[in-house]
Image (cartoon, coloured by chain):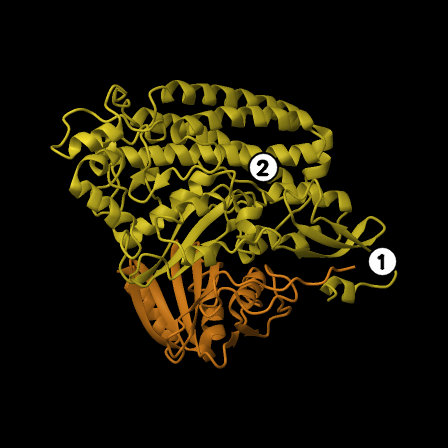
Chain colours: A yellow, B orange
Amino acid sequence: MDARIQKEARPDTMLINMGPSHPAMHGTFRIMLELEGEKILNSEIEIGYLHRGFEKTCENKTYFNLLPYTDRLNYVSPQINNLGYVMTMEKLLGVRVPERATAIRVLMSELSRVSDHLTCLAAMAMENGAFTVFLYMMKAREFLWDVIEATSGSRMTTAYIRIGGVRADLNDEWRESVKTALVETRRVLKDVHGLLDKNQIFLNRTRGIGTISKEDALSYGWTGPCLRSTGILYDVRKAHPYAIYDRLAFDVPLGEHGDNFDRYVVRMSEMEQSLRIIEQVAALIPDTAPAVKADGIEPAEAVRQGRLRKPGQRIRLSPNLEGSEKDRYQDILTRDAPVCVPPKEDTYTTMEGLISHFLFFMKGYGIRPPKGDVYFSVEGGNGELGYYIVSDGTDRPYRLHLRAPCFHLVSAIEQLIRGRFVADVIPTFGSMNMIGGELDR
Amino acid sequence: MEKETLIGEIRKRFAAEIESDAESLGDQVLIVRREGLRAVMAGLQAAPFDYAVLLDLTCVDFLASENRFEMVYHIFSLSRNRRLRIKVSLPDDNPVVDSIAGLWKNANWLEREVFDMFGVAFMGHPDLRRILMYEGFEGHPLRKSYPWRKEQPRIPLKD
């Protein structure tokens, strides 16, 4: 089968492939270009190289089990994907989340947003020749990921935000690591402003290029920083406030022209606002309860003792359960309905605990929302990240659909690069923040 | 009460096309007849309703039901800051609906995805092809009748 562009191309023009494997195509993404000299007459985009059947897989997983799959959508800001999914489920189930867990969620999603913007701009700057910016921004991202790693145990695929709350409480040293991350990120942002804002090479390649009008941006369903770069004020955190965003002070930066440079400026200012939010949330969260001392008995010992009577001593949990001790459950997980994993201490020592553990994980049990359908969205790194879930009353979704923000962004690229030069494809594509996992699902 | 009057106005304007309305967990839902979809969408996009953004477009396969496919549209009005869900049912033997690619530009790709995944055809779509799956893929993977772990034969290499 020939592609559409091959059939429609004029005989005297040149057809050339960018991608699917191209250093500037952020994963696998193919643009076929019809060129006259260096000018792009037409283009055709081919996506789907990273399609892994996310939606089909989710139909065959329980509501609890499919959470790690959402990490792999936008793998630069997995916590926002988690948040979108669990808040959709919470809307469907009607559960309330403890205050502390909500604040931790906001903290984590803002850290993720900053790292998402950093990654996008770093790649965009590198592809335009500013390798220093790339290295500086990656350095800042490391500090943000240190916080995420210390909290959730992993850097990218965290599965940290759970239905009803979060998996574990913050660790003891979180305040210092957040403070370091803020200082380092602010320093990098200042450096990057100095390196790029008046950089003639960068300006020539971004200003007035990839321009989109307000009407077209709306017609293409653009959301997030890309829509705001055209001057339209729409941010899910302001329009439909979720979690505790209505109590936080932050501005929504707007652009003017909707070109590549404005998208860069909007992302840079948004990071500063996110850092502001992180500071406010960090002040809202009370100090972590003193660490539960690891001087308890081993689980196996507890099981042996528990055969006769409930052991009086504390149980030493495995290190990967750090932060989710039973004492902390009331702060980090809801008690409205049985939607969270029962505490491990109970599972090891009491019959009732073991039964409730099995009732949570057994096929056909666990989280069973009422029949119905629900749509909920959060502000993701590159736009409105929405989930549409249809429940038929069983323990797995009848249908789960993701509204991927970059699907809408990328569909506009053909129009944005028409009539431009080949070199303009790179910054235009870079400023979109295409994430393959979310685009192709 | 603005919510009710808005839905009332919409229902009055498109009395022939709208079957019923409902509320699901705080979201407004309109159930539209298949023949009237394009007219309703065009009307809602324009003033005074001003639903300028097509947020999402997808499909659900209710295998056992008489009207097997249900198209689900989410539209959003910036000026009113309000979302609206629109549903259209399509029969199993003839899953065809009018395309709205002429109204919203992102509908082009979204409808291609639904065509790819569910085999729903869109009348008037400018370029209805597969988008996520490859040419030569057999069947429509998100249909409930498509087995989860089904394997497909290899396709020949392209030149």
Chain to which the residue tagged by mark 2 belongs: A
Disc 1 vs disc 2: Cβ atoms closer than 8 Å? no
Query: Which percent across, then down, holds residue B56?
Result: 47, 59
Which residue in the rendered view is the most extreme toward the right?
A12
**Disc 1 element:** loop
Binning the other alpha carbons within 10 Å of mark 1 as few (below 14), some (14 to 19) or many (20 upward) gives some
What's the residue at 41%, 26% (across, down)?
A: A150
What is the quadrant of the N terminus of chain B in the image?
bottom left
Chain to which the residue tagged by mark 1 belongs: A
Same chain for the residues under marks 1 and 2 in the image: yes
Instruction: Give the numbered dot on residue A183.
Output: none
What's the residue at 73%, 54% (across, down)?
A: A32
Please state which of residues A71 and A130 is positioned toward the viewer in this rendering: A71
Asked if residue B46 shows in the view, the reply is no
**Could you tell me the amino acid type at mark 1?**
Thr
Please state which of residues A206 and A90 is positioned toward the viewer in this rendering: A90
User: Which residue is denoted by mark 2 in the rendering?
Assistant: A120
Query: Which percent across, then down, holds residue A9?
Result: 80, 63
How many numbered discs?
2
Left or right of A196? Residue A218 is left
What is the quadrant of the C terminus of chain B in the image?
bottom right
Asked if residue A351 shows in the view, the reply is yes
Instruction: Give the numbered dot on residue A13.
Output: 1
Which residue in the rendered view is the most extreme toward the left?
A309
Find residue A261 and report its image quarter.
Answer: top right
Taking A12 as reference, is A242 above or below it?
A: above
Taking A336 as reference, is A123 above or below it?
A: above
Query: Which percent across, then down, holds residue B70?
Result: 42, 70
Along the polypeptide, which appears first: circle 1 or circle 2? 1
**Disc 2 element:** helix
Query: Alpha-carbon distance for marks 1 and 2?
Result: 33 Å
**Could you tell me the amino acid type at mark 2?**
Cys
